[in-house]
Structures are given as structure tokens and as C-alpha cells.
């Protein structure tokens, strides 16, 4: 199944002009922080082109912030890959590290982690920069969004460790996918990247909550489609196409077609609801500044839907055919060639 | 030094009429959930009279909710006491359990805990009830407030385990105390207890944030005064009087007097700022319903300042002189006669 499945997205979004400047600094940082520990790991990491993802999803960030956002992506994606199906006991270490990542934003920024490894040290440094200048309300929201994502990730690892990865029904899976995709905190970071905050009452409005959930569903399903070959290679049953294939008895192609239809349905509902944002602003009695901050909040969602899509079409992370040490590791059930959970 | 140090509080608050109804059910629950495991532990727990604390701090809760709020208090207070100075390695288990408590509100309510012990099982059950009917915005705020408290509690335990409990300077201690006292989430629960929510934009306003911080300081300092004898007995250096005694070279009486003066100064600033709430509501353009929800939000703070004060004057938890197994345990550096961190 090809990686470059195309969707018809209703918005274009810009790409940061700081991409190349930040990429060079970011790659040095990844190496220096020990987030890759082997030449194979580094080459694999480079092939993912996460700098492009950051430059597309946070197009308005300053040059310095762009480096930090790339740094953040690296630790999140690399941590995501630390499960090893051949070592189910590793689930406990993943949970321990994940919980350290959860509590970091709940401590004064810059505090030393209690669980020390390359991932937690990197996050401490990134969070100090990422939280800088943001309100308590934003930090609270980010911390909860980020925490929910990491907790869901641990559940995913625990299911895999118990050999239950492929047992969720469709409804259960889609609810779970919304939690594991990690889009809420990714959108939250959009405010930091552009130096603004969505008014609290708009963020608490059911329309805004629904838009964020629909963006999560859309991106999660798209990701399942684009990463299908990688996940099949890894034996990962947490993929919409795999669930449809198993649950509905669809052929792979039928399952892929249905996943595509579900994705476009989410996107269509998102677009329909987005049109109601001005009425929400009226209802909340927002002034011009408040409305402008809501507008930028919606743009942050669009940047994620579109930016992630454009990146995923070509990222080496999801390449359908791979060989070498990474493919060998993946076929053995390991997510990664490097161990990043030990000192 | 006597426990019943009096303050002149500028507001009276009601006491729930459900106190006795809920107390009986609560005490059964505490025993059935294994939150006390010995007769001595049960007698000690009873002497604290936490049901009175809950009935004063959440006077408008329904009878059923009152039981759950008491249940919540029991697990939080009992967990607070699980450190054993004679077993510093226990700090790791406390951190493990604390992190489980942190992530519970970040999972779908009712999920089984990953770290199982009486404390985590009790919290899972309480959270399912406590979160019921509350918005995502409230759950996010509560989860972050609660998480910050538990993380600070772990830092306190870690300092004690490393023999550094008595090394914080005054400024450092007061900042730390605001985090360890756990008032933010306690006030958050006031909304649940009365079935309302403070408008998000009011909660995000600097005035409201400052009121909540001042309430935390006031209650934290009062608690240090009322619990002084207990903490001296336990050898706990995390107490404002002890810090003033050490840092400023004050006699114990001078240190207690200064702690009293610092407390009344916080309270005075709180009262002064509270008078600005109507102007904040004007500034935010709140309608009558919004203003009423802000009013109840401020009352939730008052209920905590006053209710906690009235309870602490007589609670057996802070009794100046104690004997029997509990005093023996405390003098040996143990916070509790029962171990609640194992199955």
C-alpha cells in the first residue's frame, strides 16, 4: 500500500523560512543530547525529516523557537518508538519515563528530573523554553493535554506487552486513537509558537473542544493510513486499517478505502464546524483582540492538519519499503535501533 | 506550644447538615477499602475528625457527595503520612504511587490503576464520582492542580529521605509551602461539591489566581502553626515556625509570633483583593449568571480558609500531646501506623 495517499485539504498553510537554519542546529542538539546513539539511529532519524514537520505545523515560530520545537518533536517521536515487543518487561520502564514526562510541566520549569535518561533530560530543557512567557491557564491546559497523551501511550504499550494490541473493536479503537495521537498538546504549542493565547472562555466552548477532537481524529486516521506499511512491518495492530480489516472482515484494500472515507468524513465535519466560529465569538461577546486570538487558534489547528499531512506524504519514517538495520529492528518488533531509556 | 491558636477570620461559613449521615458511611468505607489496616490506625484516623473538615469546607455538598468528599480526604491525608524517615528507600514507592494518583484524572474515569494499592484503588473510585458531570476545562484544571500538589509532596519526601528537610531558606520555603499545601485542587473541588463552575475567563484572571495563591499561603501557614507539635514530634523540618527559628535565630516563641504575623498579613491581603472581585466581573463583562458563579467560586475559597481553620483547632491529628502506638510511630519518624502502599 503506498505511503503517499492524497487528501483534498481545504486550506493551504505556510512553511517557516527558518527550516534550514533550525534543522542544522537541531540535528547537532539531537546528537549532543544522546537522543540518537548510533550512526544507524541518526541516519534513520534524519530520514524522518521532523524539521519539515515542525516548520509546517509551527510556521510562525521565531528561528530560536523553531529549533526548540524541532527538539521537542525529536524526543516525543523517539520516545514513541522505545517499545520492544521482544521485551515486554520494558513496558514498566516506558511507564516510568512517561510519568516523569507527565510531571515535568507540573514542577517549576527547569527542575531536574527524578527519572534520568536522555528523553527526560531533553524534555526538561525543552519545557523550560516552551513554557516561557505562557500563562498559568495555558500551562495547565498543556500539562493536561500532554499528560493525557502520555498516559494513553502507556496504555498502548501495555496492551502490546500483553499481546492484546490487536483486540480493540472499532468504536473502542477510534476513542483510543483520539487519545494516542497527541494532537491537543500539539495545537496548544501553536499558541506558544506564535506568542498568543486563545481566550479561556473560547477554549472552554464546546465548539472549540469539538474542533480540536475532530482535528485529532482526522490526523490520527490520516497517520494510520500513511504509516500503515511501517506499522504492518512492526506488527502493530493499533492502526485503523488493521482494525477495519479484522473487525469487518474487509480486504486490505477495502479497509484502506473505508479508513479513507472515515478520514474525509471527519475532515468535512471539521470544516463545517469551523464555519461556526464567528458565531461563537459573537455569543461570547469577544472584542476584536479576542476574535483575532480565536482566529489564530483555529489557524493553529489548520497548520497541524495540513502541515502534518504534507510532511507525512514523504517522511522516511513511514516509507513502505525499508532495509538495513532499521528494518531489521522493526521486523524484530523493536521500534528503534537505539535505547534511550537508560543513562 | 498549644494547637488552638486563634485567628480573627472575617467570614463565617456554614457546616453541612449531612455530617453525621456521611461520617458513618465514610468510616465503613475507610475500613472496607483497607485505608486503615489496624485498630490503632483506625482509632488514630477517627481522632482526626476529617468528616468535620469535609463538612466545613464543602458545606453545600449533597449527602452522597459528602461521603465521597470525606473518602477523598481520607486517602489524601493518609497518603500524606506514608513516609518513614527510617526507610528512605520508601521515597521511591511513594513517588510511584503519587504518579499513579497524578495520572488517574488524565485517563478515562473508572480505568483500573496501573500501580495497585489501597490508596490508588480508593482514588480511582473517588475520581470517578468527583469528575462526574464536570467539564473538560474543570477536569483539566483539577488534574493540573492535583498533579502539582502531588509532585511537590514527592519533592518534600525526597528532601526528607536525603536528610535535607530542614535546609530550605525562608523564601524558598514559602514558595514550596504554596505548592505542598494542596489548596488549589481543594478549592477546585468546591465547584463540584456545589454543582457549578467558575467562568473560565474569571479563573484565568490574575486577580483570581492571586486570591487562590493567597488562600494557599494563609492555610499553609495556619496549618504549620496548628500542626507544629505534631511535626516537631515527627522531626519534620518543613514547618514555617521551624524555618523562622533556624533561619532568623528566633526563639520558638518569637518564631511562632512571626509565623502568626505572616499568616495575618496574607489573610489581610486576601480580604483586600477579594473586594476587587466585582470590578473584575465588570471588566470581563460577565452577565448575572457569570457573576453568581464567580461569587460562589470566592465562597469556595472562604469555605476552605474558614472550614480548615475551625477543624484544625480541635482535630486529633494535630494534638500537642499524644501517647500510645501512634506517638511511638511518629517519634520513630514514621508518619503512620499502617502501610498503605502495598497490596
Image (cartoon, coloured by chain):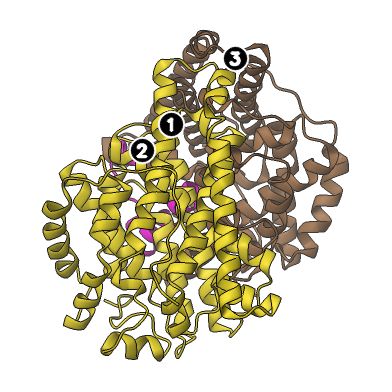
Chain colours: A brown, B yellow
- At x 56%, y 20%, the residue is B284
How many angstroms separate mark 2 from mark 3 (CA)?
A: 41 Å
| Any part of residue A333 in sight | no
How many angstroms separate mark 2 from mark 1 (CA)?
A: 7 Å
Classify residue A83 as left or right of residue B125. Answer: right
| Any part of residue B37 in sight | yes
**Residue beneath label 3, please?**
A10
Classify residue A256 as left or right of residue B18. Answer: right
**Residue beneath label 2, please?**
B191
**Residue beneath label 1, please?**
B198
Where is residue B220 drawn, in percent x and y? Answer: 50, 60
Classify residue A49 as left or right of residue B55. Answer: right
- At x 49%, y 70%, the residue is A93
Where is residue B195 drawn, in percent x and y? Answer: 29, 33
Q: Is residue A310 above or below residue B87?
A: above
Q: Residues within 10 Å of mark 2 (few under 14, many from 20)?
A: many
Q: Nearer the viewer, mark 3 or mark 1?
A: 1
The residue range painted magenta reads A148-175
Q: Residues within 10 Å of mark 3 (few under 14, many from 20)?
A: few
Amino acid at each position: 500500500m503506498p505511503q503517499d495517499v492524497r487528501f483534498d485539504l481545504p486550506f493551504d498553510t505556510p512553511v517557516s523560512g527558518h527550516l534550514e537554519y533550525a534543522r542544522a542546529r537541531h540535528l547537532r542538539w539531537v546528537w549532543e543530547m544522546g537522543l540518537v546513539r548510533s550512526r544507524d539511529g541518526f541516519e534513520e532519524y534524519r530520514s524522518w525529516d521532523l524539521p519539515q514537520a515542525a516548520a509546517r505545523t509551527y510556521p510562525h515560530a521565531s528561528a530560536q523557537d523553531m529549533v526548540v520545537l524541532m527538539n521537542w518533536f525529536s524526543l516525543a517521536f523517539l520516545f514513541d518508538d522505545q517499545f520492544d515487543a521482544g521485551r515486554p518487561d520494558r513496558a514498566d520502564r516506558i511507564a516510568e519515563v512517561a510519568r516523569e514526562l507527565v510531571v515535568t510541566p507540573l514542577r517549576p520549569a527547569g527542575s531536574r528530573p527524578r527519572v534520568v535518561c536522555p528523553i527526560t533530560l531533553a524534555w526538561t530543557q525543552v519545557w523550560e523554553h516552551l513554557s516561557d512567557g505562557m500563562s498559568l491557564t495555558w500551562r495547565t491546559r498543556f500539562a493536561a493535554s500532554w499528560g493525557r497523551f502520555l498516559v494513553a501511550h502507556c496504555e498502548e504499550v501495555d496492551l502490546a506487552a500483553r499481546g492484546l494490541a490487536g483486540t480493540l473493536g472499532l468504536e473502542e479503537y477510534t476513542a483510543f486513537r483520539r487519545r494516542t495521537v497527541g494532537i491537543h498538546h500539539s495545537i496548544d504549542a501553536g499558541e506558544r509558537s506564535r506568542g498568543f493565547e486563545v481566550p479561556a472562555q473560547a477554549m472552554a466552548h464546546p465548539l472549540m473542544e469539538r474542533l480540536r477532537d475532530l482535528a485529532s481524529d482526522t490526523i490520527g486516521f490520516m497517520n494510520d493510513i500513511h504509516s500503515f506499511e511501517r506499522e504492518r512491518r512492526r506488527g502493530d495492530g493499533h492502526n485503523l486499517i488493521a482494525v477495519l480489516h479484522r473487525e469487518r472482515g474487509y480486504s486490505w484494500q477495502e479497509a484502506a478505502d473505508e479508513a479513507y472515507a472515515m478520514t474525509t468524513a471527519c475532515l468535512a465535519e471539521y470544516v463545517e464546524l469551523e464555519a461556526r466560529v464567528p458565531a461563537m465569538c459573537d455569543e461570547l461577546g469577544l472584542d476584536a483582540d479576542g476574535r483575532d486570538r480565536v482566529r489564530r487558534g483555529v489557524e493553529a489547528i489548520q497548520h497541524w492538519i495540513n502541515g502534518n499531512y504534507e510532511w507525512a506524504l514523504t517522511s522516511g519514517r513511514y516509507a513502505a519499503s525499508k532495509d538495513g538495520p532499521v528494518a531489521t529492528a522493526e521486523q524484530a518488533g523493536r521500534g528503534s535501533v537505539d535505547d534511550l531509556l537508560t543513562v
